[in-house]
């Protein structure tokens, strides 16, 4: 008898908006991106503490992207979500929804051959800037506690442990 996988422990982090951001050449995701973003998500999350979030296969990751873009996890904010491309092909993305009236960085991922180049950081900064320009005061996210690399990135961008806002 096999045991069910243990759900990863997560922390909620927040950052105050708006923030200035350098110019970028990212674009907003569209429905036609769903298959390639699902493939990217699976590549990026496979073998990491967040692998369960991708659902265990390219098909499951693609379904996660579809659910995100169609509002299953709160209204999707395409104007605050971005896709980075290399030679016209998506290689990274940051997807933002609204959860309980607060913008949520639902997913951010970079194809393994493109990691370490600052794409994730720049995508998150672009989302933060877009949200601030739209009048939002905060951006939240959930991070797997064992994902040290992600935690460091978020903390370097000013995210702090969640506290009730007044």
Image: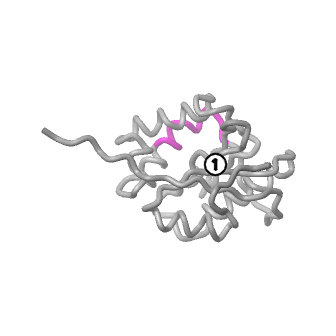
Q: Is residue 57 above or below residue 110?
A: above
Is disc 1 placed on a helix, strand or loop?
Answer: strand
Which residue corresponds to mark 1? 105
Residue at 68% from the left image edge and 54% from the top image edge: 163
Q: Where is residue 156 drawn, in percent x and y?
A: 65, 71
For the point 58% across and 35% down, the residue is 68
Q: Could you say which is closer to the camera, residue 147 or residue 29?
A: 147
Question: Residue 53 location, x and y as percent?
Answer: 44, 44
* Rendered image coloring scheme: one colour
Magenta residue span: 29-38
Determine if the magenta segment contains residue 147. no
Give the percent coordinates (x, y) of residue 130.
Answer: 80, 50
Within-10-Å neighbours for mark 1: few <14, some 14–19, many 20+: many
Q: Is residue 60 above or below residue 94?
A: above
Q: Quadrant of residue 123?
A: bottom right
| 47, 105: nearer the viewer | 105
Q: Main secondary structure of the magenta part?
A: helix
Using the image as rendered, state which of residue 154 and residue 113 is in the foreground: 154
The residue under the point 77% across, 58% down is: 16
Q: Is residue 36 magenta?
A: yes
Is 159 positioned to the left or the right of 111 in the image?
Answer: right
Drawn side of residue 100 relative to residue 9, left or right = right
**Residue at the spot x=68%, y=32% of the render?**
75
Measured as percent of width and height from the top left, residue 46 is found at: 38, 53
> Which quadrant, please, contains the N terminus?
top left
Residue occupying the far left of the picture: 1
Q: Quadrant of residue 33?
A: top right
Above or below, 106 relative to 124 = above
State which quadrant residue 154 falls in: bottom right
Q: Is residue 5 left or right of residue 55?
A: left
């Amino acid at each position: 008898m096999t045991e069910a996988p243990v759900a990863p422990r997560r922390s909620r982090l927040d950052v105050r908006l708006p923030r200035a951001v350098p110019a970028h050449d990212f674009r907003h995701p569209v429905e036609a991106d769903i298959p390639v973003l699902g493939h990217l998500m699976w590549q990026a999350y496979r073998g990491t503490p967040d692998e369960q979030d991708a659902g265990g296969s390219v098909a499951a990751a693609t379904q996660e992207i579809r659910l995100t873009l169609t509002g299953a996890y709160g209204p999707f904010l395409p104007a605050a979500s971005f896709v980075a491309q290399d030679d016209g092909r998506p290689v990274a993305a940051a997807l933002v929804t609204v959860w309980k009236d607060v913008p949520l960085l639902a997913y951010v991922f970079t194809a393994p051959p493109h990691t370490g180049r600052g794409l994730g950081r720049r995508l998150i900064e672009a989302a933060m800037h877009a949200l601030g320009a739209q009048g939002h005061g905060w951006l939240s996210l959930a991070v797997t506690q064992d994902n040290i690399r992600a935690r460091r990135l978020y903390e370097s961008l000013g995210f702090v442990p969640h506290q009730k806002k007044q």
